[in-house]
Amino acid sequence: MPDPAQLGASLYGPATHHALGEIAAGIRLASVRSLIICTEDSVSAQHLPDAMKNLFKALHRVKTWDGRFVFVRVRNPQILQTILDMPDVERLTGFVLPKITAENIDDYLKPLHKHPHCVMPTLETRETFVESDMYGFLRLIEHPGRRSRILSMRIGGNDLLALLHMRRPKGRTIYETPLGHVIARLATIFIPQGFSLSAPVFEHMDDPKTLSLEIEHDLNHGLVGKTAIHPNQIPLIEQHYKVCERDIAAAVRILTPDAPGVFRLDQSMCEPATHRPWAQAVLSAARHFGSVKHAN
């Protein structure tokens, strides 16, 4: 299973795309770290048969390699089973599961029992707003048979805003909407239990300044990776995942086996007992995305 930090900016594309085969093969968009082929919201009901035919033809061309992953966002458990029955399905890294709740997750996981694929459930239903429901869902997925399948949890920002009869306003990060405190709560529920969370899509392609600010908030909430809806968003998103050299130096010192219990570095206190998870995340990000001299 990949390290969730490797996914970077996950590019969504509809399964109806005319060049799906070339994209799946890495002929187009070869630099995309994680591709998510969507058969759900981005495909209307009348176009679903065409989308499935297009996916069927593209599967044998799917190519993954170290640092490149291909997922399919399925529409429902029945579509998942249909895809699992297709030739070359083993070429896929895994599946994104939409609108996941405690009531339907096993409907998605049961068809996978003979397959090695990982999954990324998406939190985007009314239950996401209810703290007790999220703790109940957490208890359910902590079972080893489910936990071992889950690569990361995705936050479906647009679906959650739709439940509030809202659309993301231009010039505002998602943290300036009612979802700000929801994301913070999800982070405190799932991340301490070892599940990673990825950040919602930024749907406006003409506002890089706000996107950049939102990514900073994503990182400050402990989110790993972000959904992208256009290739032009990817360089900006992943630029923020580069780690400043000062943080790398601190992380190395913190993880040194003979590091003191507490020490001062660059006028900040370093305490290995509490800063070790941060240091490990810093070095992981540096391995995948590189470094910069100064913080973004």
Image: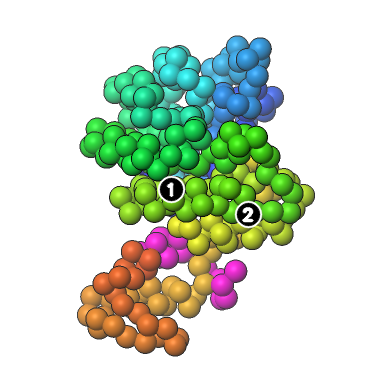
Per the image, label 2 sits on a secondary structure element best described as: helix
Q: Nearer the viewer, residue 59 or 183?
A: 183
Span colored in magenta:
280-296
Disc marking residue 278 = none
In which quadrant of the rendered view does residue 267 lie?
bottom left
Asked whether 32 or 81 is in front, the reply is 81
- The residue sitting at 29% across, 34% down in the picture is 140
For residue 268, above or below residue 4: below
Mark 1 residue crowding within 10 angstroms, few (<14) / some (14–19) / many (20+): many
| Residue 103 vertical position relative to residue 280 in the rendered view, above or below | above
Identify residue type, mark 1.
Leu
Residue 136 in view:
yes
> What mark, if any, has residue 176 been given in the picture?
2
Position of the C terminus by quadrant: bottom right
Query: CB of mark 2 within 8 Å of CB of mark 1?
Result: no
- Reading the chain from its start, which is encountered first: label 2 or label 1? 2
Residue 37 vertical placement versus 170 (above, below) = above
Residue 45 belongs to the span the image colors magenta? no
Q: Nearer the viewer, residue 295 or 177?
A: 177
Name the image quarter holding the N terminus: top left
Q: What element carries label 1?
A: helix
In the rendered structure, the answer to whether residue 50 lies left or right of residue 115 reads right
Q: What residue type is labelled 2?
A: Glu
In the rendered structure, the answer to whether residue 210 lies left or right of residue 94 reads right
Image coords of residue 282 (percent x, y): 42, 65
Residue 195, position in %: x, y? Answer: 36, 47
Residue 75 location (% of width, % of height): 52, 22
Q: Residue at x 66, y 12 (%)?
A: 46
**Disc 2 from disc 1: Cα separation:** 16 Å
Q: Name the residue under label 1.
A: 186
